Amino acid sequence: MFWRIDLGAQGPGLALRDMQAGEGLAQAKAAIIAHLAPDILVLSGLDYDYGLQALAAFRDVLAGQGHAMAHIFAFPTNAGLRTGRDMTGDGRDYTADDTQGYGMFRGEKALALLSRWPIDTAAARDFSDFLWRDLPGARLPDVPAEVLEIQRLSSTGHWDIPVILDGGARLHLLIYQAGPPVFGGHPTRNRLRNHDETAFWGAFLDGRLPMPPPDAPFIVLGGSNLDPFDGDGIQAAMQALLAHPALQDPRPHSDGAALAATGISAAHSGPHGMDTVQWPDRPGNLRVAYILPGVGVQVLGAGVFWPAPDAPDAALLGPPDAPLFRHRPVWVDIAR
């Protein structure tokens, strides 16, 4: 399961403090996860800290809701990693947008993995220091050469994490969270970077990068912040990944998303029932979270947790006119 959970806070250690204090939003989101009961859970939007204390605290919150996940893991994030340079050309070198990935502090709104299955941490690979300019066919912005000399592609991270299944088989999780296409001071940088953060996986699976793809079953999962049909991003990157011959798209959908396609969302060209985030204003509801198993993985089912308002579990989302959160969890069942 993947979820843009958004449990970050306004400063280092504050997310940990809130969870230890029994903060209600963390409890509400843990209740949804417990209801869905995933064996493997990838989260984005949870602050990273030394010793994974915030992640461990959320694991405890989740266990308190009746769903234990013994194994946790995260690499350090690019979010908030200072560069000491003016990365956007606005004459400043100290803003949240002058870091390797947008963030007011190192670790803000990072990636995390929780699993009921052991994680092969020794074989885990972190590609987060891969330079943007080294991506084949990179769509580079008009910025000084000294910026591209240090600019990493990943705004948060790109990981290959093997999970050990029954009998010792490995399932590789190819995890990422891309930045949104429209924000920040530079007029085109983040739109181009958003495209290339997803294009990275196609190049990786094609063997066009220095890092070889895994030789065992794998799943690409994470948040692309990119809909294949609608929104402000360059849709070609998402369309190409969904059509990649090494991947399959289980096309998860929900009744709630289909019913929520009103207002600006009603004019979208993509399938409404596959949306994963509810944005009532522009750009509208979009599909921005994905789980794409490799072609060798047997898919048994898939969905987005976005129940119709009259469904028994709809109350977990909060009031229909004021939901507790915008992003919805995406899940895929596979045969082990």
Image (cartoon, rainbow, N blue to C red):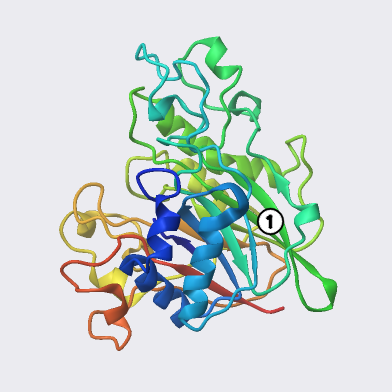
In the image, what residue occupies the spot 47% across and 42% down? 236
Q: Nearer the viewer, residue 12 or 336?
A: 12
How many labels, in total?
A: 1
Q: Residue most toward the bottom? A: 312
Rendered residue at 49%/16% (across/down)? 85
The quarter of the picture where residue 24 lies is: bottom left
Q: Is residue 336 left or right of residue 290?
A: right
Q: Position of residue 316 (x, y in %)?
A: 31, 78
Q: Quadrant of the C terminus?
A: bottom right
Does residue 1 appear in the picture of this structure?
Answer: no
For the residue labelled by badge 1, is the local secondary structure a helix, a strand or a loop?
loop
Mark 1, residue position = 246
Q: Residue at x 72, y 44 (%)?
A: 206
In this rendered view, identify the residue nearer to me: 37 or 81.
81
Task: Give left or right: position of 100 versus 182.
Answer: right
Mark 1 surroundings: few (<14), some (14-19) or many (≥20) residues within 10 A: some
320 is higher (above) or lower (below) than 240: below
Q: Residue at x 41, y 33 (%)?
A: 191
**Residue type beneath disc 1:** Ala
In this view, the residue farthest toward the right is: 167
- How far across and down, in percent of the image, does residue 171 sit? 73, 65
Residue 135 in sight here: yes
Rendering coords of residue 90 (x, y %): 34, 14
Q: Residue 89, image x and y in percent?
A: 39, 14
Q: Is residue 68 above or below residue 46?
A: below
